[in-house]
Image: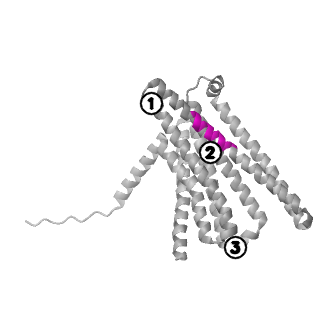
Amino acid sequence: MERTLNNILTIIYAGEFLLGILGNGFIVLVNCIDWIRSRKFSLIDFILTCLAISRICVLCIMISSTSLYVISKEIQYNKNLLINLRFLWTGSNYFSIVCTTCISVFYLLRIANFSNFLFLWMKRRIHKVLLIIALGAVFSFCLCLLQKDVVVESRLQNQVNSENNVTLDFLMIKYDLFLTIMFLIPFVVSLASFLLLILSLCGHLRRMNGVDCSSEAHVRALKAMISFLLLFVLYYLSNIITVWANHILGSFVAKIFVNMLLFFCPSGHTLLLILWNSKLKQASLCVLRKLKGYMNLRKPALPKRSLKR
């Protein structure tokens, strides 16, 4: 029974990985082809491309760490390799969340209508606002890199001198707290953008007394934001369960199930982005039509029956 469950979860796990790689690779390919043809790269396309690249990195790091664990269980005792894999995952995952936050802020500044002076100033300077968010993310990541080097150096000293356990524990708590704050800030910004967009939609509906194109744009943006927020919560609950599965359960089936939940966010949200972006949706439908035509051509022609008179 456990072997059957293991095989089923492994197939789902591999399917989610392939779906995420193909979906994110499709976004990168479509936007790059469009950029080569038109020599123009819109802001939202650039953010989506960066998001897709970062998610491809996240998926590759996750599948690599799982594969290494399956190949050799001694990998869990190689502390240096685990620290490096965790840091690579943290970096790519953080930039993925920052890109999604930039999408939320972009929708807010492009669609929402407020008469506040600060909001109007930000609306006119949307490129600068997103650049500030990106620079803040790079600065936070550099601080994370410095914290990581301090923790690694203290861990090496701890192997020589066992009296540094208290210092190492303090540094680890400080590092984890910094990571929590670093990941929490983009989530708070996305949540604030979501709430502000709801207020803008309510005010717009009161003024217009009906549904128009602007209301539909509000609804589409809210769908994109709420999907990210829900998947973000699921993703980090899965991370907490991952620690529990690794240290308490110790079962390979449990780890595959948790990793399956982790893959659901970068894979599932990518499909939603393709469906809710008109250019990506049209490109995906075009690819499906061509695949359908190709499959029809590959089918062997049925022999015609001779009619007897």
Q: Secondary structure at mark 3?
A: helix
Q: Residue at x 61, y 27 (%)?
A: 123
Q: Distance between the Cα atoms at labels 3 and 2?
A: 34 Å
**Relative image position of residue 103 (x, y in whole percent):** 59, 39
Q: Residue at x 66, y 41 (%)?
A: 188
Within 10 angstroms of label 3, few (less than 14), some, or many (20 or more) residues?
few
Mark positioned earlier in the residue sequence (3 or 2): 2
Q: Is residue 189 magenta?
A: yes
Q: Which residue is mark 3?
A: 73
Q: Secondary structure at mark 1?
A: helix
Query: Exactly how many numbered labels are in the figure?
Result: 3
Within 10 angstroms of label 2, few (less than 14), some, or many (20 or more) residues?
many
Q: Quadrant of residue 9?
A: bottom right
Q: Which residue is mark 1?
A: 213
The stretch in magenta equals 185-196
Q: Residue at x 85, y 59 (%)?
A: 168
Under mark 2, the amino acid is: Cys
**Relative image position of residue 270 (x, y in whole percent):** 54, 49
Number of the label disc, if any, that sits on residue 50: 2
Quick one: quadrant of the C terminus? bottom left
